[in-house]
Image: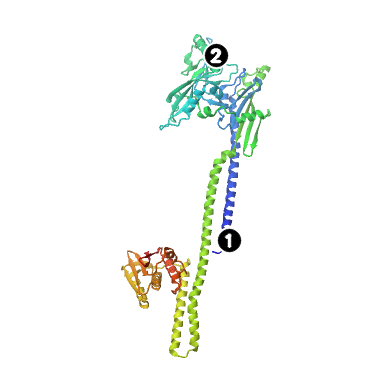
Amino acid sequence: MNKKQKKENRKILISIVAIVLLICLLAMGTFSYLTYNSTKEIDKYQAELKANNIIDNANYIDITNFGEVNSFVVGHLHNYSDTDENSTYVILKNDYYNLSVDNANKLYIKTENYYTSLDYFTADSRATYNYGLGNYLDYFTLRNSMTDEQYNKICDYLNTEPDENGNYYILSVNQYAIDIFSEASSEEMIPIRLEILLTNENNVWYAQDKHIEYFDLSSEKISKMKEIQKEDEENYKKYQIESEDDLYSLPVQIGPILSVGKMSKNEVTKDFFINGGKENELKKFSESNSLDDENYETYIPQDNFSFIYTQIEHTNPNYVLASNYHEGEVITENDLTAYEQKQCKIISYQKYEPLKESMPTLIIGNCIILVFFIVIGTMLILIVWKNITGRAIREQQRIAMTNAVAHNLKTPLCVINGFSENLREESGYLTKQHYINVIQEQANEMDILVHKMLNFSKLESDSAKLNIKSFNIKTELENIAKKYNDISSKNIIVTADDKEIFADKELMELVFENLIENAVKYSKDNSDIKISFANNNFNISNECDEISKKDLKKIWKPYNRLEKDEEVRGTGIGLSIVKHILKLHRIKPYTEYSGGRLIIGFYI
């Protein structure tokens, strides 16, 4: 392959790589754009859905005349807290009572059902029913009521890997108080005692878990709750409720302190316990961005790849003024004032990062696209390279064939030309006859060369087909060997099994003739040429000078002759014809040099 061809081939390969790379980048860009934008649209839809859900559930809000908030509302709002991502932040505001409850660093814990007694007792006092809606646990209230030693020990439990049976540790609030007695009654859960439980995925109830260790907590709030508890228990003894049958089988809360029941585990999640206490990014955002009082919703871009969705809603839920009056009664000004003073404002903030959310999909998708185009590009390069190398080989063969034909035709043409001149001048009959015989001999050699070239071209083309039929290989080998024994001084010995084989008889005759002719030409004078066929293995061997392994590989190439054989006249395509015919029969030939003999063979 010359420099010009190499340069052209390099340009073709570079063009293919550039085109495949460009298409790959376009595909990856299109996939990334569609994935990111679809994720962004889904995030916007989810943000609106989540905000509306928060607002809808705010219908359970009830602000009392003392500015207290029902525990379910607070718990429900905190259910949207995400301590690890800080992606949601909800504020409940009532400007009349200077009330603001947010969901930062708080965990909603669903508790069991129980009856609640009043904080004062009379003979006709009645119990109220708590539907087990749960309460919220503030991270800082929890953390500040325990020592560092307790915190570290609990962390060790929670970070322990599950055992071979799938059992693992969880943290439970074993005893707690509900803050319903202070002036700023928020119904916050105040943990008094924590408990480590050993559980597994099959355990649903608290009673199914195994107790491991208790952790008693202490704080000013806990001390105060214990004082109130003691007071209430003494009062309850004085004024016991007479109709206890009405309380069914549920436990009665006397005072603010409760214990875990048989069902609800009061679990404090591992993520909240270990990762809580972080500053909520959206809380900080709300403090630095003033919002209008009007109802609205908006998307606030933070950068090219994230946004904050904000929604404000004014509501006076679960309080329909007219429903509190009978027909004909007048709604007083005080009633209207009380109604207005219960008006609430729900503000929700949600942060979404479409790029971060879609990153796993983008990485996996783009990797698949990249691998796909690498495979396609590699296949294209291999196909093109195969065509290029095939074209280069054919070009080399064409040049070699031209040189070989020119070389092989030059001698007979010179002989024919010279003897033709002599024939013109010669008058003697015998001499003329000799000249004519030489001319015919050289013409025959040229004819043989042309036929071999035509056979080789035909075998190289895709149109070559086999005509398979049965014939006796021993008879065939003996007939061909006899013909060459008659015209050469070499002794050709055939030992073959008397066996029928299935092959293209004419082409296999050409194989045997070329192999025998090659052995006759290149074997030493007066040496034996041995041909054998046994156990489906054919081989022919002849004595010759030593041939290296490198030269053994070259003998099958067309128009390729060893330097030491240049003095022997030949076409250089005999063994190439043999190889092509065997390839059509799906037969692979082998060559070796052993014991001073060249051996060529194959299995039929």
Mark 1 burial class by Cα count in 10 Å: few <14, some 14-19, many 20+:
few
In the picture provided, is 322 more to the left or to the right than 559? right
Residue 305 visible, this angle:
yes
Label 2: which residue?
119
Density class for disc 2 (Cα within 10 Å; few <14, some 14-19, many ≥20) is some
Q: Residue 592 falls in which quadrant of the image? A: bottom left
- Mark 2 and mark 1 in contact? Answer it, CB < 8 Å: no
Q: Residue furthest bottom?
A: 427
The residue lying at 55 percent from left, 25 percent from top is 139
Secondary structure, mark 1, is helix
| Mark 1 residue type | Lys
Residue 482 position, x and y percent, is: 34, 75
Residue at numbered disc 1: 7
Q: Nearer the viewer, residue 28 or 414?
A: 414
Disc 2 to disc 1, how far (Cα)? 97 Å
- Type of residue at label 2? Asp
The tag on residue 176 is none
Residue 525: percent from left, percent from top:
37, 74
**Nearer the observer, 381 or 122:** 381
Q: Residue furthest top?
A: 238
Taking depth in this image into account, of 195 and 492 the one nearest to the observer is 492
